[in-house]
Image (spheres, rainbow, N blue to C red):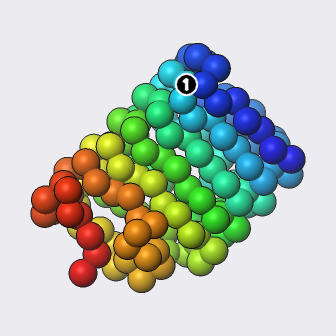
Amino acid sequence: RDLFLIENQLTGYIPPEIGNLTNLTWLYLWGNQLTGEIPSEIWNLTNLTNLALDYNQLTGEIPSEIGNLINLDVLGLSRNELTGEIPPEIGNLTNLERLYLDYNQLTGDIPQEVCDLIESNSLHINYNILPGNNLTNTCE
């Protein structure tokens, strides 16, 4: 039920077939050289409690379908090349304890739904293209 492929120098895209692993609870692919967009099939893995795709070269936007992962405790997407705005649907993830979105190219305001959900010490969004100082991006 857990898949850990950490720092294995994996390259290329995350295969869409990953969506067939419907019983996954932990998916850790961080520290590789994965490229391209996060396959939409990942947003259907509703049993996930931990998703860590940090430290890759993933591109594209974080889609609103991220709100489907209602069992997530930890979401790690930091140190990629993600663009666009932070989707307010992250606010649907009511079990979320830690959110890592730092070191991407995210723009726009931090959605209030995200601010309401995450304590500031568990929300890592620095070093994006967000309003304010990159050292002190916080929710108001």
Residue 36 higher or lower than 50, as above or below: above
Circle 1 crowding by C-alpha within 10 Å: few under 14, some 14–19, many from 20? some
x then y, percent, for residue 63: 47, 54
Q: Is residue 83 visible?
A: no
104 to the left or right of 119 = left
Place residue 13 in its image quadrant. top right
Place residue 112 in its image quadrant. bottom left
Give SS at disc 1.
Answer: loop
* Outermost residue to the left: 132
* Residue at image point 24% right, 81% down: 140
x then y, percent, for residue 74: 60, 59
Q: Is residue 30 visible?
A: yes
Residue 58 higher or lower than 74, as above or below: above
x then y, percent, for residue 19: 74, 42
Place residue 25 in its image quadrant. bottom right
Q: Which residue is mark 1?
A: 32
Amino acid identity at mark 1: Asn
Residue 50 higher or lower than 110, as above or below: above
Number of marks:
1
* Residue at image point 66% right, 40% down: 28
x then y, percent, for residue 34: 53, 25
4 to the left or right of 90 = right
Front residue of this view, candidates 117 and 68: 117
* Residue at image point 46% right, 74% down: 118
* Outermost residue to the front: 121
